[in-house]
Image (tube, rainbow, N blue to C red):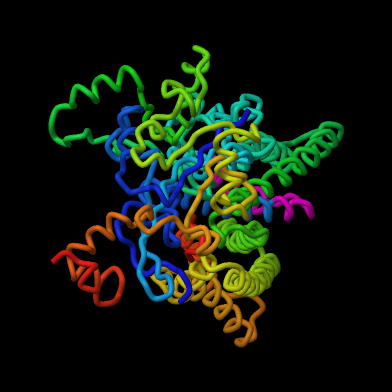
Amino acid sequence: MKAQTRRQWITTHEWMVKPMRQTEWISGQGILVWLAEVFSALGMGTYLVGLLAGIWGITTWAWWTTVVGWVLIVVFKLPLHFAYLGRKRNFWRAIPPFTSAWKTSWFARGMFFSVVFTGAGFVQIMLWYLLHWADLSASAASVVTTLSWIVGIIAGVFILLVGMYCGFAMSYCKGVQFWNTGLLPVVFVLMGLADGFAWTLGVNLVTGSDESVTSTLEWCSRVLLVINALLILGYLVQAYRKHHAAEVAAMDLIKGSTAWVFWVLLVGLGIAAPLILSFVTLAMGSSSSSQAILIVAIVCHTIGAFALKYSVLKVGIYRSVIPGVA
Amino acid sequence: MRWGMVINLAKCMRCHGCVAACRIEHFLPLHITWVKLIAYEVDEKGAVDVSTYPVRCNQCSDAPCVHACPTEASHQRDDGIVLIDANKCIGCRYCVIACPYQNRTFFSKDKDPGYFPGYERTRFEKMGEKLYPHVRGTTEKCNFCAERIDAGTARGLKPGVDRDATPACVNTCQARALTFGDLDDPDSNVNQLIRRHDGFQLRTEYGTDPSVWYIDYLHGGNDNKAPREAQTGSHIQHLSSVDRDAYRRIYGREPEDAEVKS
């Protein structure tokens, strides 16, 4: 009979004998990490969509979208991350130039990306405000436009990095086979973008933009959702084939204790519901959904964003350290 | 020079002496353990056997925790020992997550309720707060008793040979299952053991190159087996020799009369 663990004799540290869950980033105070990561994705998606929309002309809704994205990062994500730290007053040690750990540490890189985005994003928002509402002379407008392009590109690159670093930080963990894949940052970024389109729809509704914008945003959001659904399916399949610990994690998502979050909140509400609502609207012969349907879809998207990060963090299962044991 | 440890699993008798020695040496709070002992049953050719793995920080050459640390609080010395600077640590716990061996613990308030929760701290605990203060909100792990090594080598002593320069767990191991020495010296006691007994590290596929090596009678097949009396489950075997029920539970068959005392 193949040598493997049957049962433990003295349960001194059972988490090192069997595949065991990580708890630091999801249980107790770890909930703050989960929430911070959700706001990272939402903020990244919303800000980036607003920024891209502004390329074709700065509008009120595009400006407000960037503001909402910036607020999600600066007011929600960063304070939640800082609240999680064991020694909060030392947080500055993680930010370059006070550390050179950015060469290897994704956490330090993330802090750097967030700080740069906070500054560049704020300046970009102010410049857009001047361009859209202030009465500038032609020469001043030219200078501000040039500046807004430069700062906008910097802010855009860094917000993308803010959205990506969470995935890279998790995929670096070799002991957690389910996370240890290059697909994870891609899933996080694409899902964040889909949610960003949804939040932009919300901003669009509040600021009262035209229907063509709404239908374009809705269409982009749905396309990304379909891509994400396929990507998540591919992620689970590769995890299932990768290693026993990753397989355990995938099976926990599919039919374990985390299954209800995965199926009901992520797949059902986060992906299927917005798609079904769109198809129903199309079937009724309309190019964009009604306001009520849009609001429901946006709420579903947001629930899906929370569910995605929760389920991925929850099934962070470590491989056993004992050779010959599963 | 790179300090390393060889743990002979065949000799380990699961006495938890290393765990206790470490707690005393470093005045560890109640729910913090730097040295851990894993015990589990294996099913080998139909007979249940017991194996143990004493584990501690592997002081990896390519330590993921050091790479993950955003503040450089986790750092590696020239002698290979990975240390945590509590003053620099911000308590992000990324190192706890990144360690594939799960040998790091975050020191939160709930991990230090006192040795006798609800009662006054013992004199030992009070002394520890002065002599070896642990900083809440930071991460903790085994440091190979770096302070003993430093103090000993400063006096010209040799770690692994002289007790005053050797980790407390190695000194206290009554089965002499732990050996400490220089992995960079091909003729050192640790390298000789690794060569002679087909030593192995945990999860080499991570590419971390741990400094803690194991010698295991199960590893490498039957040729590498220690005498039955010296095996990990020797005291379980003793237990089985006085109790028929225990014998059946452990070996999965009825004992011969000569094998039990009663």
Q: Is residue A107 magenta?
A: no
Quarter residue B112 falls in: top left
Q: Nearer the viewer, residue A139 or B218?
A: B218
Position of the N terminus of chain B, as image quadrant, is top right
Q: Is residue A64 magenta?
A: yes
- Residue B186 % position (x, y): 65, 35
Quarter residue A212 falls in: bottom right
The majority secondary structure of the magenta stretch comes to helix
Q: Nearer the viewer, residue A41 or B37?
A: B37
Q: Nearer the viewer, residue A243 or A204?
A: A243
Position of the C terminus of chain B, as image quadrant, is bottom left
In this view, the residue farthest toward the top is B155
Question: Residue, x 61% and y 50% (percent of image)?
Answer: A172
Count the numbered circles shown. Answer: 0
- Residue A322 % position (x, y): 48, 57
* Residue B111 appears in the picture as rendered: yes
Question: Residue, x 24% and y 67% (percent of image)?
Answer: B259
Vertical placement of residue B122 versus A323, above or below: above
Vertical placement of residue B46 versus B35, above or below: below
Q: Nearer the viewer, residue B172 or A287?
A: B172
- Side of B245 relative to B131 (left or right): left
Question: Residue, x 33% and y 38% (percent of image)?
Answer: B174
* Residue A70 appears in the picture as rendered: no
- Residue A133 % position (x, y): 69, 41
* Highlighted magenta segment, given as a residue range: A51-75
- Side of A186 relative to A257 (left or right): right
- Side of A86 relative to B95 (left or right): left
- Side of B145 relative to A291 (left or right): left
- Residue A16 % position (x, y): 43, 55
